[in-house]
Image (cartoon, rainbow, N blue to C red):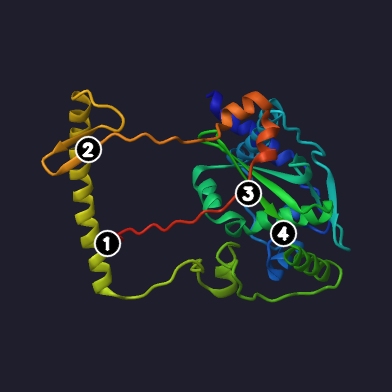
Amino acid sequence: MLSEIVVLSAEGRARGGKEHETRNGISCSGVFPCPHYIYRAFKRTLPQREVDGSSQLNMENGWWQEEESIKLLGQSGIEVFHRQERVEIGQSKVPGKIDGEVNFNKEVILWEHKAWDTRKTNLFKQKGLSAFPWEKSQVNLYMHGRKLEKCDFYVKGKEHNEPYDHVVPYEKDFALSLIGWLDEVILGGWEPQPMECEYCSHCGLSFECWGAEIIDLAGLRQMSDEELSKKFKLGKQYKDFSDWILEEVRAEMVMRFDKQGLGVGDTLLIDDVKVQKMKREVWRLDKRLLVEKLGPTALIEVGQEKEEFSYRIQEVMS
């Protein structure tokens, strides 16, 4: 009963709330990198989804998650400032409000917050903003309006509360293309027709534009080599079996070595197999201790973000 009251109350807030403040029907958060989509948003002819109690609660929860993230950052010594500062983009003065800005390694950068589920968070970790055209457009317009070169895109996991962030650069050419389209549509009376682009699988208008759903195949290539795929599957079977055997044998050999009372540098011969205990000096930076001793900003000042790549090969189950 109480839960029903909460949902109904949220539905009342959704229906009674003021429309989102925009100029000419579009704001920075609603810009998509397609001239036709921008035109549809400007003319308010996009498919409309009714805001019910559940969606209103999700939206409000996102606001609360942002406040919580700001509080946690503050407790860690990181201040989010210029919160909800207004920007106006282009000659058409498309409005927007930033989440805030932060000092990052002695540089002021944009701070954009999202509260996402695990699926979206993992996709962001794998592909960055290339998989999120709305958010990519939004932060690039904000960075243009605030004259900033970087954005800390900060994601708070809804299911596990663990944050993840990544610093993305300002893409000038991308931002200027968006601004040019906005000004042409709003001020110049341009009525662009649908045109196929890399973002067609994201906008939700593919059936209207092309009469069919468009699937993102940007990262997919297909070829046929039956012998090669058979070798991989057979090799994987052998490897899985050998790994299991080696793991069992290794555990038994280590146990027998320790039972003999042997130490570092000593050797145990089991027939023609040699077991030795080796010592290696390893120097590691303890991030937790660094923050504890020097404060959280010390990690920002000495840290470097690098991209590392690996390849995962798996059998496709049919």
Q: Earlier in the sequence, mark 2 or mark 1?
A: 2
Around disc 1, counting alpha carbons within 10 Å, would you say few (fewer than 14), some (14 to 19), or many (20 or more)? Answer: few
**Residue 232 % position (x, y):** 26, 64
Give the residue pinned by disc 1: 318
> Can you tell which of label 2 and label 4 is closer to the viewer?
2
Which amino acid is tagged 1?
Ser
Report which quarter residue 288 is drawn in. top right
Mark 3 or 1, closer to the camera: 1
Seen in the image, is 26 located left or right of residue 203? right
Whether residue 306 is situated above or below residue 83 in the rendered picture: below
Q: Are marks 2 and 1 in contact (CB under 8 Å)?
A: no
Q: Which residue corresponds to the image point at 58% horizontal and 62% vertical from the top-left?
A: 204
| Structural distance between the alpha carbons of marks 3 and 4 | 20 Å
Question: What residue is drawn where x is 51% and y is 35%?
Answer: 283
Label 3 or label 4, whichever comes before in sequence order: 4
**Residue 50 disc label:** 3
